[in-house]
Image (spheres, rainbow, N blue to C red):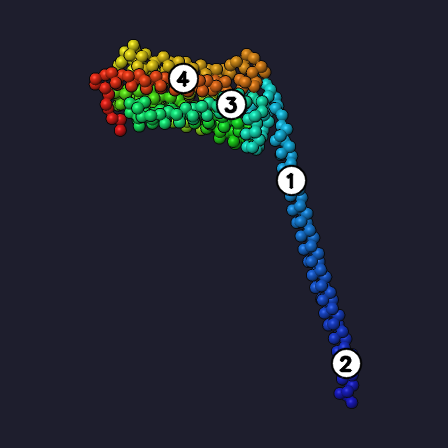
Amino acid sequence: MSASAGHRSEGPAHNRCLFARRVVHEKEEETTKREEEDDEEEEEDKSSDEGLLLQAHHAMERMEEFVHKMWEGRWRVIPHDVLPDWLKDNDFLLHGHRPPMPSFRACFKSIFRIHTETGNIWTHLLGCLFFLCLGIVYMFRPNMSFVAPFQEKIVIGAFFLGAILCLSFSWLFHTVYCHSEGVSRVFSKLDYSGIAFLIMGSFVPWLYYSFYCSPQPCFIYLIVVCILGIAAITVSQCDFFATPQYRGVRAGVFVGLGLSGVVPTLHFMITEGFLRATTMGQMGWLFLMAVLYITGACLYAARIPERFFPGKCDIWVSRRPGIHTLSSQSMLASQYISSLIRTLSLFCSSTPISCSISWW
């Protein structure tokens, strides 16, 4: 009887325990289910947010592309005083400047618009094409037109290579310098390097033909000119070299490189005599080239004529007036090269003991 009473007393307690466990289990299931639902909602919200962000990003890209295309076709020239500092180079050119154009396509399209760089771009671009064609014609001339075809084609090729590099770097710089400050800095260095290449290339034919029978001094002078040219190129790679404050320094570096030809000129005149130097050596062409080089550098450093006519020379005088003369100097160089070839051919054919020295 006592055992049955104990069993009856344990029954309700056991039931209450089972009921409590069931309640706890149900609550745990509800909590787990609620957490799973919350996780699903969070994932849905997250995916929804990501989708919205992705859509917004694509919409922004399309809007930027649309605005960029509209801007490319409708940009307008601006005055000098609203240009960013890295585009301010010549404060005597008051109007007609391109705005910053962070697109190479827009920069190259601007070739066909009127602005401060139009004259620079087209004079150098057409000059580059001219000398490229002229160089090809010279390289494919019959060998009978030369005394030593292989040597002379290399010598003349050095001149044309310098001219083409100079004009190519120049028109590319004037086209894309408004892209960004970094691009402007890189192409500015190429532009100045091209001037050094042109000066070095201009010396090669004259030294070769003038010292045709004396290869040793010719090699020495060529090495000196190349060293000075490399020094000028090295200096032009410094960032400060392209700043407006160093305009005179830039002009001085290239004038000094050009004047390095004074020593071989005097050498030739002393050894050959003035009359022979002016006829066979074509000193007239050389002096004319030197005058144009120096005049162009002085005009560039002094910013003439825009200094005396502010706002009147914005379009066709443009940013670097002195460099415009480089095309003319190169054409004069090609003329005296032709004269030297003809003179040397006549000299060697009419002289019993001609120079038969092998250079290599």
Is residue 85 at all visible to an observer of this figure?
no
Q: Earlier in the sequence, mark 2 or mark 1?
A: 2
Residue 309, horizontal then vertical, whole percent: 56, 13
Which comes sooner in the sequence, label 3 or label 4?
3
The answer for how far apart the CA atoms under marks 3 and 4 are is 20 Å
Numbered tag placed on residue 122 in the rendering = 3
> Depth-wise, is mark 2 or mark 3 nearer the camera?
3
N-term-proximal mark, 2 vs 4? 2
Q: Nearer the viewer, residue 358 or 17?
A: 358
Amino acid type of disc 3?
Answer: Trp
Q: CA distance from mark 3 to mark 1?
A: 35 Å
Quadrant where the N terminus is found in the figure: bottom right
Q: From the image, state whether disc 2 or disc 4 is nearer to you.
A: 4
- Tell me: residue 107, above or below residue 245: below
Tell me the tag on residue 11.
Answer: 2
Circle 4 residue = 332
Above or below for 69 versus 232: below
Q: Residue at x 77, y 81 (%)?
A: 11
Kind of residue at disc 2 = Gly
**Is 24 situated above or below 353?**
below
The residue wearing badge 1 is 62
Identify the residue at image location x=75%, y=78%.
14
Tag in front: 3 or 1:
3
Q: Position of residue 64 (x, y in %)?
A: 64, 37
Q: How many callouts does the rendering have? A: 4
Using residue 178 as the reference point, say whether residue 283 is left or right of it: left
Question: Quadrant location of the C terminus?
Answer: top left
**Residue sticking out furthest to the top:** 275
Dot 1 falls on a residue whose secondary structure is helix
Amino acid type for the residue under numbered disc 4: Leu
